[in-house]
Amino acid sequence: MARPGFTLEQIRSFVEVAETEHISRAAANLFLTQGAVTQQVRNFERSVGLQLLERDGRRVRLTDAGHALAETCRGALRAIQVMDDAARAIRELEAGSLHVGASPTCATYYLPPHLAEFTRQHPSVKLEVAVAGTLELNRGVLAGSLDCALIEGEPDPALVSFELSPDELVLVAHRDHPLSQMKRITPSELARHRYILRGPEFAADRPVRQMLGDSYERMETMALGHPEYVRAATIAGLGWSALPKRAVIQDIKHGILKSLPVPPIVRTISVVRRRAQGGPAQEAFWTMLTGGVKGPSARISSDGRGAS
């Protein structure tokens, strides 16, 4: 294998500048001078033959090439961290880090109990959580910047996936909303009222699009991103929404929200990882989540059971 023309320090400097979009802040975080960081990044650009940064006053911003290369560089640094973690864990028997991704729904309702249990078992492992949409999480796991991720959408076919739990989406509205007074609701009736959603990039919106068909494009919508923001807007009476039953069960119980007479949407919460062997913390977390199904060698069947 040919020896690369760049160094690890050049990659580390570039990633820090990409994260902060500021030379002086990156230098402070790396305990280097601004001149040293600038030189490292310039040498890295020369090595890869691409312009990665543009100056914008006192700040810098990534070029298109910089954006494309930054994720791969994060993955390279993550791989080196995994190697260091593995060596430390072998020496000390307790150490390491775990970088987990989660969609907003998973981060709110599914991931915390698992992380709490993992922390009780392995208190010395450093935890990091990245919250994003399913597509971005799949990319992060593939690139190696995330060890694994809990997602509510479709796993990337290149990843190993395990079905962690079913998740029920219910259509809800405030008790005084016109839809809450109806005993039977058609898609055309739903389309006459404002739909509060997280955003088209989130998996929860896809089944609603399919249910409404052509009516979806003519409907008034309001995108708020996080499911708790959507819940708050629905409670305020701004429209109807499709939310995890876990998020609104108490609101329904207390009569604040009403479940609309539409069949619930059942989807799957999955955990995904790369096929390659990971660090000790990643393997321990995966084993805890899956009950011992081995990620790199398992074939996950459609019902979520491991098959050798």
Image (tube, rainbow, N blue to C red):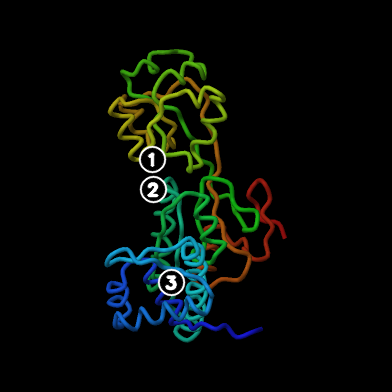
Q: Quadrant of residue 290?
A: bottom right
- Residue 15 location (% of width, % of height): 42, 71
Q: Badge 3 is on which residue?
A: 97
The secondary structure type at the circle numbered 1 is helix
> What residue is rendered at 56% in x and 25% in y?
213
Instruction: Count the numbered circles shown.
Output: 3
Between disc 1 and disc 3, whose residue precedes?
Answer: 3
The earlier-in-sequence mark between 3 and 2 is: 3
Q: Quadrant of residue 14?
A: bottom left
Residue linked to disc 2: 108
Could you classify mark 2 by the number of other residues whose Cα lies within 10 Å: few (under 14), some (14-19), or many (20 or more)? some
Q: Do the residues labelled 1 and 2 touch (CB within 8 Å)?
A: yes
Decide: few, some or many residues near mark 3? Use Cα within 10 Å; few <14, some 14-19, many ≥20: many
Q: Is mark 3 on a helix, strand or loop?
A: strand
The CA span between labels 1 and 3 is 28 Å
Residue 139 is labelled as: none
- The residues tagged by marks 1 and 2 sit, at their Cα atoms, a distance apart of 9 Å
> Which secondary structure lies at badge 2?
helix
